[in-house]
Structures are given as structure tokens and as C-alpha cells.
Image (cartoon, rainbow, N blue to C red):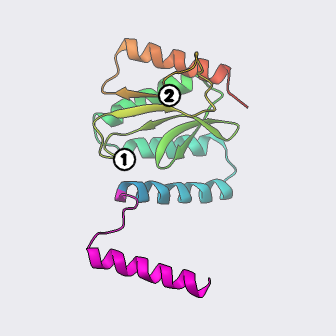
């Protein structure tokens, strides 16, 4: 680092201290999710990456969730694994997720995890749900009825039939 760069960094640090403003960064929840992801990557590197290990990790994460999200996540797990048996359950940033060829296709995000109003079923870009020039990739969930379950099953089937390379 050059002398000028060091001086600029020192001035910037002093300026932040002088104004009393804390630097904005990641929230506690975001830091926890990143830490969980680092642990997951280490576990994946050590593990043989078999489906049973991933499923037990997902079920353990689901068991940690508060109600009613625990029940919803269990039901989603059943729907996803039945609708797309080729997907491998695994955790992703501490959330239940389902992958194909090592890439996350869909995931469940608990509302409690990030202090949000509702739980989310999300799809990554590997789930080729493309429809026109714009399409949803995340769905808010407050409860699961037969109608939502049917929609989720159809979405997961579509996502896995045409996974993008």
C-alpha cells in the first residue's frame, strides 16, 4: 500500500469516528447466514456428497425452525422431493435447499431467519422458469393449502425439466 493510500484510509477512519456514524455493513442475520454457508462449504468438501447426508442436514435445519414455519418447511420438503426426485437436498446459507448437479434450484427461507413478514420459496437462475421477458423467482408463503401445494409442485417440476446449463 502506498503512503498516500495509507493516509487516505486513516483520514477516512478518522472522519467516520468524528461524525459518530457507524459504517454500514452486514446485519447480524446476514453475517450468520454467511458463517453458515462457510460451514456448509467445508462440510461439502469433507463429505462424500451423498443425498442422505444432505437430507439429514435439511431436516435438522427444519427442526430448528419455529412453528408454523417448521410444519410448512416439512411439507415443502415432501412436495419438492416427491415432485423432483432428481434434486439433492442440502443446506444453503443455513436454509433448506434443493440442488441439481451441485447448483441450487430452489430454497426455502424462513421469515424468522431474516426477520421478515413472510417465508419465501425462491428459485435460482438454474431453475429455468423463464416466461416472456419477466417472471417471478420468489414466492411469499404464509400458509400451504392444496392450491399452493399444487402450484409449488408444478413449479418445481417445470424448474427441473428445463434446468439451464
Does the segment drawn in magenta span residue 153? Answer: no
Q: Compare residues 58 and 99 and report the one nearer the observer.
A: 99
N-term mark: 1 or 2: 1
Q: Compare residues 76 and 50 and report the one nearer the observer.
A: 76
Residue positioned most to the front: 4
The quadrant where residue 22 appears: bottom left
The quadrant where residue 1 appears: bottom right
Residue positioned most to the bottom: 3
Rounded to the nearest angstrom, the CA distance separating label 1 from label 2 is 25 Å
Above or below, 99 against 136 in this view is: below
Residue 56: x and y in percent read: 52, 44
Secondary structure at numbered mark 1: helix
Mark 2: few/some/many CA within 10 Å (<14, 14-19, 20+): some
Residue under circle 1?
Answer: 64
Please state, as top left, top right, bottom left or bottom right, where the C terminus lies in the image: top right
Residue 73: x and y in percent read: 40, 33
The quadrant where residue 54 appears: top right
Mark 1: few/some/many CA within 10 Å (<14, 14-19, 20+): few
Above or below, 78 against 158 in this view is: below
Residue at 28% in and 33% down: 68
Q: Compare residues 100 and 162 and report the one nearer the observer.
A: 162
Number of numbered labels in the structure image: 2
Residue at 46% in and 15% down: 151
- The residue range painted magenta reads 1-28
Is the residue under label 2 in contact with that under label 1 (CB below 8 Å)? Answer: no
Prevailing secondary structure of the magenta residues:
helix
Residue under circle 2?
Answer: 137
Amino acid at each position: 500500500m502506498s503512503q498516500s493510500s495509507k493516509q487516505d484510509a486513516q483520514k477516512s477512519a478518522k472522519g467516520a469516528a468524528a461524525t459518530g456514524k457507524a459504517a454500514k455493513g452486514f446485519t447480524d442475520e446476514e453475517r450468520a447466514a454467511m458463517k453458515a454457508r462457510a460451514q456448509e462449504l467445508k462440510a461439502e468438501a469433507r463429505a462424500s456428497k451423498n443425498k442422505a447426508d444432505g437430507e439429514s442436514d435439511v431436516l435438522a435445519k427444519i427442526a430448528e425452525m419455529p412453528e408454523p414455519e417448521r410444519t410448512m418447511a416439512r411439507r415443502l420438503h415432501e412436495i419438492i422431493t416427491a415432485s423432483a426426485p432428481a434434486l439433492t437436498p442440502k443446506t444453503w446459507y443455513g436454509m433448506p435447499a434443493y440442488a441439481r448437479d451441485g447448483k441450487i434450484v430452489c430454497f426455502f427461507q424462513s421469515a424468522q431467519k431474516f426477520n421478515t413478514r413472510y417465508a419465501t420459496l425462491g428459485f435460482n437462475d438454474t431453475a429455468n422458469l423463464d416466461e416472456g421477458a419477466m417472471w417471478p423467482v420468489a414466492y411469499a408463503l404464509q400458509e400451504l393449502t392444496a392450491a399452493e401445494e399444487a402450484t409449488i409442485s408444478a413449479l418445481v417440476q417445470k424448474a427441473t425439466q428445463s434446468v439451464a446449463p
